[in-house]
Image (cartoon, coloured by chain):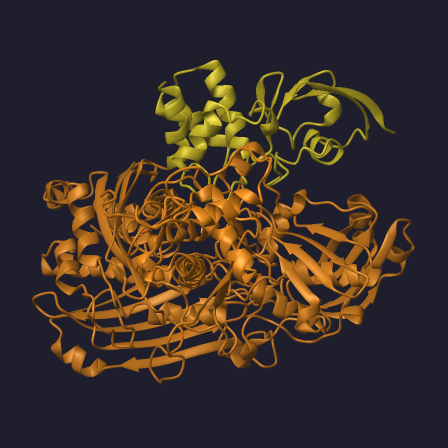
Amino acid sequence: MSKNNSYRILNTRLPRVDAIDKVTGKAIYTDDMSFPGMLHGAILHSPLAHAKILNIDTSRAERLPGVKAVVTYKEAGTRPYGVSPARYDETIFCHDKVRYTGDEIAAVAAVDKDTALEAVNLIKVDFEELPILLDGLHAMDEGQPQLHERYKNNICAKVNWHFGDIEQGRKDSHIIRTDHITSKMQDAAFLEPQSVVAEVDSHGNLTMWSSTQAPHYVQRTLAMALNMPLHKVRVIKPAVGGGFGPKASCSTVELATCLLALKTGKPVKTTFDREQVFLHSRARHQFFHTMTTGVKKDGTLSFLEHHCIMDGGAYSSFGIAAVYYAGSLLGGPYRLKNMKYDGYRVVTNKPACGAQRGHGAVIARATFEVQLDRIAEELGMDPIELRLKNVMEAGETTCNELYVSSFGMKEALEAVRDSAAWKKKRTLAGKTRGTGKGIGAACGFFVSGAGYPIYRSKTYHCTVVTKVDEVGGGVTVTSGAADIGQGSDTVLAMITAEELGLNLDDVKVVSGDSSLSVDLGAYSSRTTLMTGHACKDAARDIKRQILEVIGGKLNIPPEKLDLKDGKVVGINNDIDFSALREEYLQEHKGFTDLPDGPELTFREASRIAFLEIGSVVGTGSYRPPKLGGSFKGATVGTSPAFGCSAQVAEVSVDLETGEVTVDNITGAHDCGFAINRTQVEGQMQGSMMMGMGEALMEQIIYNDKGRIMNANLAEYKIPTSLDVPHLDAIIVESNEPHGPYGAKEVGEGAIMPVIPSILNAIYDATGVRIDELPVTPERIIEALKKKRENK
Amino acid sequence: MKKLVTLTVNGITHELAVEPRRTLLEVIREDLGLTGSKKGCGIGDCGACTMLVDGVATFSCLMLAIQADGCNVETVESLAENGKLNKLQRSFVDLGAIQCGYCTPGMLMTATELLRRNPHPSEKEIRRSLSGNLCRCTGYQKIVDAIKAVAGE
């Protein structure tokens, strides 16, 4: 589909506003920064997975020439922090014990990196080893080592939901199936390792530049954990090399670097190496899903009973939300009246897990979509037909009270079905199953911005302040929103340019700075809808002010005027604006590039507005209306809008080696309205690749001591350009009533159908179901062998 | 003990005293202030640090600065001339081959070498040449498209 509307800027393929800086090497990421007299930080990580700390001796490190500060819990204090106030279970440094290999114990600032690293090695820690818990599935069992006193039986969070009536659903069912899927912990593998520079000015103001996704949350955590007033802490996000979730939570490297800057009075920089990225993690949990689903004879879903254990590693982080998302987001995209969910997030002696693209919902979605395929097979129904039979439509509410105001699910499914020639390829399925070629489909459902902030508050979720250049001509959009590569700065610039009739080059976006505005950050696929609203309002506010001044001067009602193509329109030949032009020309004697056309330009109009009323500043604020039900945990999963997606994957499997080749991926995503078509496709294609990696190759491997055995990008495999096939991205636009211009999310929803569509295609190709992710060649061979033996 | 090396970087010859253990990437980023080349892994897995050394695409995190003594080094900063993007850069910008941008400098240098060697590569050849450069954002599709667009000219 292509653009079919009257927008000049929106819905086009304009290049990103930061593209030129990124192809010339000019874009500045945190590790590119350096200050005079800057010190370098390094962090001491625990070599053990579970141990009591008996003593920490930093004396040798402190004596090393070039060392300026060594900090442990003694300097940092032990104020607990975390992501959700109900689960503050981390301290800046370990004090009583360490809970995973990599847990942070101390930090050093020194004149250079090598000295800092040498000093870290001179810190002597006496441990008393404790029994280790690595098995998430059995973490709740009696007699297991306990990680935190407050988490009895290692349960850090549990959710027990029952919507509708499961027993009735059971009675109504013709077929009932129970299936399991187990995944492995994964890493987000963003290309830029976390990096932080912190500095304290002479008034005690702390400024931290960090590769973060959420400056506002991080600002709050820094202030709380470092015991500083919020307004004395400023977080700035330079260019960020991807985040995908783990960079949303405040990290030890941020806290420790700030502490070192406060202690030394000097700027300090600390950058993780790749191994530390893996150790710190905060990425995808390990999931153990069991689902029992019933359907009527005609394929109508009658109930879903869902049990889930999530291994979250040593601390809560964003996992407190993940355990809710894993259950709530199965409420859609299908009509499902009866749903029961029992979710348990457990702690183990592994790096803490948090949010990663699709948050807690990705493996749950995969489990359910695979199960739907198995049900379709039992019913003798086409899997896409089964889905089409059950998909929700706009205006419906799920059993867990999620209201779906726009919904292109049917359109998305039909688009991938037709584009991938599903019917033709699939009719062969019965005959070709197990011959090494397969095709599979799946759907997905995701929030377009979390309905509530992570801390309980009435706060606006974002504000935008846009100011007209006082010399006239351009505007500057200021916002706390975090562009981490997904392109939110471009979205804000495009919205502003559209509203004010400007070119993209005349709109400057300054963002990612906690001192500019409250913005909850780049997570839960929220920025286009939420900050987009605020940005649109700010631009309209400016437009109103300028047109009021111009209308007043020319005696025209402002509503008869508009800003378009860099000009004020609505002034016809009868209206004499020569006095305004004269006023503008009078103050630009000596300038040669002056307006002389038959229309009043934005440059003139904006300057004249300033001369009349002073600063022309527009503001916009957004927070969602009250959303969701009244049951416990009803807030997680709510959103002003929901995205949905469908995908068809085609694979070839070598039945001798078990090697899977993904031949084609066709995905369709309903983003409501594409502000930038290229960027929407980019989010979809990136999701396809990440899901493909998770389905086929990505897994953190631990040894029996809880140490990661593949903490690098050679042995933790992510897809390369040779692994990934042509990625066909189809944009579906359903015109979301709660989104700016009809827009809603694409960043995370697009990953939802990826894993299950590949799993379903692998089944079609091999005739075996693999219920353990990733589906490696070994697992396929093993399953094929088992099948042969059972024959 | 520091050693003297002569590096010609983006056409400018520098005489530098460097510790023998420092990598070419470190010296170019820290001593010459050319921070366009990125460190994503430090051990040759990701390709974000790719530079051309005597015309050959090289992981500069795996090469010591002293090994590059006397060599001609090209980094991403050399691609635009007089502030004007070259065709490959323009194509990356126009076709949306960039998201977070952290892999972009390495991708551009790898593609530059490819196109010099083989001005009209097939899609397969493009994908093969990029296989040492990881990207986590784009799924590679638009990067391949951008290189193809230049190669097809």
| Viewer-proximal residue among A153 and A43 | A43
Please give the name of the residue rendered at 22% of the width and 51% of the height, measured from the top-left corner.
A441
Q: Picture coordinates of residue A322 (x, y %)?
A: 44, 68
From the viewer's perspective, tell me whether residue B119 is left or right of residue A108: left
* Residue A153 vertical placement versus A2 (above, below): below
Figure chain in yellow:
B
Question: Which quadrant of the figure has residue A641?
Answer: bottom left
Please give the name of the residue rendered at 44% of the width and 32% of the height, measured from the top-left corner.
B92
From the viewer's perspective, tell me whether residue A419 is left or right of residue A212: left
Q: Picture coordinates of residue A246 (x, y %)?
A: 53, 58
| Quadrant for the N terminus of chain A in the image | top left
| Viewer-proximal residue among A465 and A285 | A465
Residue A75 seen: yes
Please give the name of the residue rendered at 35% of the width and 45% of the height, measured from the top-left corner.
A9
Please give the name of the residue rendered at 17% of the width and 47% of the height, measured from the top-left corner.
A417
Figure chain in orange:
A
Q: Picture coordinates of residue A600 (x, y %)?
A: 41, 46
Question: Which quadrant of the figure has residue A228?
Answer: bottom right
In the displayed orientation, state which residue is furthest to the left.
A298
Q: Picture coordinates of residue A630 (x, y %)?
A: 35, 85
Residue A786 seen: no
- Count of labels shown? 0
From the viewer's perspective, tell me whether residue A36 is left or right of residue B117: right
* Residue A513 vertical placement versus A727 (above, below): below
